[in-house]
Image (spheres, rainbow, N blue to C red):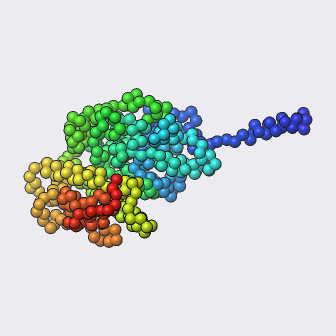
């Protein structure tokens, strides 16, 4: 056998260089896997089964536990997590960066252990996506095709993940909130309280993620594309109830009785109202932190995070829609407190004390951050909101944020 000692020094050095070439590891290797119809169905089933409010708050899943997220982050993470677990490609646009992408083949974190790369990737991605990103990373679909894993976006405002469809054709939706932080997500059985209103750009509405190989194709060329929702929204005059009834017609397996529908809307209204409690308390805490650091006003980013004008308008519209449903059943003769009676209790001018107690029990809003024993109910919130007393400005004091004073807030800080 020939001895290696006879090789020239140059050959040995050359061979050494060849065998120690550095390798760059991707976040995860997708190999020859690719998205198709079968994988899309598996994704839908996975979301319906696994996408729960505590997905990012479970110590049993250390790779995901306590990853900070807001509404858009959570939806992108939903898609990325499935791709990661199933070794599928993942590719989205790098917001505001032409011809740049965020994808699983990135090698930015190749020095990290495999179980830490996804967390680093998630943090990187979350800083570079938002509700406006969905306009280029997804496409609108027909209402009858809404499935778990799809999303709804209102660019610049909010976004929801679809996690299922009830027998009556109502979407189960999951959403996170701003600012990005580790937290449970919020699940509702309700339609997103928006209506697609961009028939030209088609940047909003019910949507589905593009497959990586189609990421730069126009939305009209995506398999499953449809502009139907915009046509229907315009046809009903952007009216929420008729629009959602059109969705229900296409998705339901049975009719939804008025009593069931009213109770569903009441529970959704309560959940939206409780969301506002969290928003306001987070804003007040942030303001205290800012003041303790020597500043008196929020900057533009902070103001955008903690102000609530669009949320408050949506909440007011939701109350209006509930009032329409509440009185759609005609004269009530039953003595028992059903959903219609409970809903009317929010708006009726003369309310018996026992019904006020029912409202308190149904949805008590613990708005006082230091006293959980005190609360307001939906009737009280509606009265202050409808009277224009509620302030959306995060600089406003507690009483103005909830309309508990007749003195209007006049702030000195800049608004954005």
Q: Specify the farthest residue to the top.
A: 221
In-image side of 313 versus 332 (left or right): right
Residue at (84% x, 36% y) in the render? 10
Rendered-image quadrant of the N terminus: top right
The image shows residue 199 at horizontal and vertical percentages of 29, 34
In-image side of 303 versus 264 (left or right): right
The image shows residue 277 at horizontal and vertical percentages of 32, 61
Counting every numbered tag in the picture gives 0
Residue 277 seen: no
Residue 164's image quarter? top left
The image shows residue 245 at horizontal and vertical percentages of 23, 41
Residue 238's image quarter? top left
Residue at (39% x, 59% y) in the render? 298
The image shows residue 244 at horizontal and vertical percentages of 25, 42
* Residue in the foreground of this view, choosing between 268 and 235: 235
* Residue in the foreground of this view, choosing between 215 and 160: 215
Residue at (20% x, 49% y) in the render? 321
Residue at (16% x, 64% y) in the render? 355
Residue 205 seen: yes
In-image side of 412 versus 134 (left or right): left
Image height check: is 415 above or below 11?
A: below
* Residue in the foreground of this view, choosing between 294 and 333: 294
């Amino acid at each position: 056998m020939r001895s290696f000692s006879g090789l020239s020094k140059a050959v040995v050095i050359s061979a050494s260089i060849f065998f120690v070439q550095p390798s760059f590891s991707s976040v995860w290797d997708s190999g020859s896997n690719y998205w198709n119809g079968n994988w899309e169905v598996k994704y839908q089933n996975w979301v319906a089964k696994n996408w729960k409010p505590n997905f990012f708050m479970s110590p049993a899943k250390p790779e995901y536990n306590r990853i900070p997220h807001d509404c858009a982050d959570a939806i992108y993470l939903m898609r990325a997590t499935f791709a990661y677990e199933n070794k599928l490609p993942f590719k989205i646009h790098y917001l505001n960066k032409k011809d740049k992408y965020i994808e699983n083949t990135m090698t930015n974190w190749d020095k990290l252990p495999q179980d830490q790369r996804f967390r680093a990737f998630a943090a990187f991605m979350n800083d570079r996506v938002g509700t406006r990103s969905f306009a280029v990373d997804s496409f609108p679909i027909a209402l009858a095709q809404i499935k778990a894993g799809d999303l709804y976006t209102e660019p610049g405002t909010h976004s929801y993940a679809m996690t299922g469809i009830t027998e009556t054709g109502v979407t189960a939706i999951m959403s996170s909130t701003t600012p990005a932080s580790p937290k449970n997500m919020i699940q509702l059985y309700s339609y997103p309280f928006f209506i697609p209103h961009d028939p030209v750009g088609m940047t909003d509405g019910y949507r589905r993620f593009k497959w990586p190989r189609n990421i730069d194709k126009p939305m009209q060329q995506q398999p499953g594309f449809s502009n139907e929702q915009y046509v229907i929204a315009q046809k009903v005059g952007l009216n929420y109830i008729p629009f959602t009834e059109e969705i229900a017609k296409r998705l339901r397996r049975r009719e939804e009785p008025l009593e069931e529908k009213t109770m569903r809307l009441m529970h959704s209204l309560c959940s939206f109202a409780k969301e506002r409690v969290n928003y306001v308390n987070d804003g007040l805490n942030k303001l205290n932190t800012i003041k303790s650091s020597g500043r008196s006003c929020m900057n533009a980013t902070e103001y955008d995070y903690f102000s609530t004008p669009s949320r408050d308008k949506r909440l007011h519209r939701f109350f209006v829609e509930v009032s329409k449903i509440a009185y759609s059943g005609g004269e009530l003769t039953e003595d028992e407190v059903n959903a219609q009676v409970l809903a009317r209790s929010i708006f009726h001018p003369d309310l018996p004390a026992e019904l006020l107690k029912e409202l308190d029990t149904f949805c008590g809003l613990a708005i006082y951050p230091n006293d959980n024993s005190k609360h307001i109910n939906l009737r009280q919130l509606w009265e202050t909101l409808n009277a224009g007393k509620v302030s959306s400005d995060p600089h406003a004091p507690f009483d103005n944020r909830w309309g508990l004073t007749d003195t209007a807030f006049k702030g000195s800080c800049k608004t954005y």
